[in-house]
Image: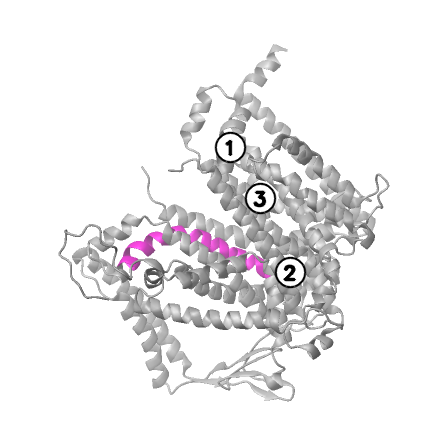
Amino acid sequence: MTFFSNIWRNEKSREIIVQIIVLFFLGWFISWLVMNVNANFEALGKDISFEFLFIPAGYDINQYLIDYNNRDSHLRAGIVGLLNTGLVAFFGIILATVLGIALGIIRLSKNWLASKIAYWYVEFTRNVPILLHILLWHGIIINTLPHPRKAISLGEVTFLSNRGFYIPKPLTETGIELVYLFFVIAIIFSILFAKFCKKKQDLTGIQYPVFWINFSVICFLPLIAFFLSGMPVSLEIPALKGFNFRGGMHMSPELAALTFALGIYTAAFIAEIVRAGILAIDKGQREAAESIGLKPSKVMNLVILPQARRVIIPPLTSQYLNLTKNSSLAIAIGYMDLVATLGGISLNQTGREMETMLIVMLIYLSVSLSISALMNWYNSKVKLVGR
Amino acid sequence: MSEKTYKPGNYPDLPPPPGTVGVYGWIRQNLFSSISNSLLTIISVVLLYYLIDGIIGWFFLDAVFDAESKIACRKIDDGACWAVITRRVGQFVYGFYPEAERWRIDITFLTMFLAFAPLLYPDIPKRKWLLYFSAFYPFFAFVLIMGGYFGLQKIEYSLFGGFMLTIILGVCGIVCSLPLGILLALGRQSNLTVVRTLSVCFIEFMRGVPLITLLFVASSMLNYFLPPGTNFSILVRVIIMFTFFSAAYIAEVIRGGIQAIPKGQYEAADALGMNYWQKTRFITLPQALKISIPGIVNTFIGLYKDTTLVVVIGLLDPLGIGRAALADTKWNGLSTETYLFVALFFFVSCFAMSRYSLWLENKLNTDKK
């Protein structure tokens, strides 16, 4: 008896016993789940197989980045859905970042009125569920925008209607390769130039306006090539044919609603992150920078922002991740993203809940895990080295 | 105003110069301190003018509050047609709960405030007696809402809907996910490798997938994992998923709180000879929970907002009721009115929650000057 009570009183052996018990229960729980699944599948005459991925999907998708028709496989439908998720996340992130940073800065501005407006924007947007934002925007686009025949025209090239937005589509002609080439050259030049300037500054302390030089190089070099090769880009302008527009690029109401909703909703969170990041910088930093005679723009660019960036970027990335995950709500308005294709129609057609949901979850999981791994790496890289 | 100059130093009791105090001074400092600032003010004023003008007109002045249908609304005025809400307000609040039994919901939610008061406000008089009521409340609410005992008519889950469903889902999820989240956070910080790995896997999985896929699992797959023939209500399954999902987020918030506690606290506890559970109960949790209040409340708000997702798996929360109303040909196309009404409800409740968290944060902040 004393032997057992000694084992239990020893911290090390007690830890091992507890862990063995936990493992035992875990094993029992998992085998219980597997047994249940087996029994249920047997009763229904089902099995687990991924062959359904290669049979024709048989449904249409109205928005696709790679060629797709309903004779393509479920796998391809899933990929189209995944790309659509990427597309809306991309547009949403751009909108959210621009709007969010602007609002965050306005919120800190000395102007009382502007700062209050930004404050109430943030409160109103983030206290309303994202699904409601999506449905509201979708409703506004399809119910209040006019029919294509009476579409709102922006300069006769872009049209807003309840069937979606129509924007001019750039068409490339021969000779465009030169522009691409010059663009690549400009990028390589600016990277080298930035490195050179950094070295020079470390050695001599002389600063060059790196940003403006690189900016103009990247803008003008391809532009020169564009004129040299005889302007090889033309715009295809959407035109009204019958009941709808032909030509140009079409942004479906679903994509537009989803982009607006995700962008506007996430912008409220980003504004708070930007504000908190700038406020987190000690007041002494700004005062010190001002006292050594830096002008306001340099105080911001050289002192405040580099430090604020360290505070801002991790939560900002997690907002981007949230935006991407929230884009799965697309299913509520019928935008064909990953969840709506593979986890929606494919699931209903093939009846393979287990397999489709497994794939969908694994894709989202691997995206989030890899981004958070990247963030951990970034955090450890920029972390202030403490005592 | 006289242009008089004063020699420095001889007039200690002069008032501050005009233009730096009072309303005028405030306006000058906060709205017109520089050219760019004045420009910003003017733009804001113009923006606000159009916004308020449009909102008041559409919401109230030109709005129609009762009519037979959308077309009837449009005949009266061209603003918002709130008739879609006023004609169905009962459904928006109670779902399809039988009309004769709705008093039960009213009582449950009124007494809910009584049950939550002692938990939310520590200074309330007669707190001890109210706490007994809080402990008893879940059974009381369950019996009253579900019925089937004491001669109350039994109500099916499928009749639940509207704001009542949102509140049931939100409150159940919040109440269940806090303890689970605390356990997960402790598990993640544990010395036991097995426990730690399990907690990390659970947390990362829940945070990595969209909630909607978890709801699909709850609605269509959960039965496969249970012994054949088991069947329990979709409402319970959804609450379980909400609990798991938000517990993972709460665990991460509390972990941040635990990690922020200075090492000396643990060393002191060890020196006093406390065991693990005493340390957790008296040292770790009180401090960690206090630090993480804002994060926890934010997670709760997130959970509360996420309850709207149940509309995708066919439950009739306010959005589901709204969509059903819009599908009616009488109200077709009034989506803006419907969704704005629901948005207002969420705004009021979420804003109240975040205000409460600010208040609590200030109250518990012991480092006050």
Instruction: Give the residue number, with chain letter if any, for mark 3.
Output: B248
- Check chain identity for marks 3 and 2: say if they share one: yes
Q: Amino acid at mark 2?
A: Val
Q: Chain of mark 3?
A: B
Instruction: Give the residue number, with chain letter if any, for mark 2.
Output: B342
Q: Amino acid at mark 1?
A: Pro
Q: Is residue B308 one of those drawn in magenta?
A: no
In the image, farthest residue toward the top: A2
Label located before the other in sequence (2 or 1)? 1
- Check chain identity for marks 2 and 1: say if they share one: yes
Label located before the other in sequence (3 or 2)? 3
Rendered residue at 69%/46% (across/down): B239
- Residue B198 in view here: no
State the predominant SS element of the stretch in magenta: helix
Q: Is residue B337 left or right of residue A375?
A: right
Q: Which residues are magenta?
A: A299-328
x, y percent for residue A362: 60, 53
Q: Secondary structure at mark 2?
A: helix
Q: Nearer the viewer, mark 3 or mark 1?
A: 1
Observer-nearest residue: B148 or B121?
A: B121
Q: Chain of mark 2?
A: B
- Check chain identity for marks 3 and 1: say if they share one: yes
Instruction: Give the residue number, with chain letter if any, for mark 1.
Output: B286
Gap between marks 3 and 1 measured at Cα: 20 Å
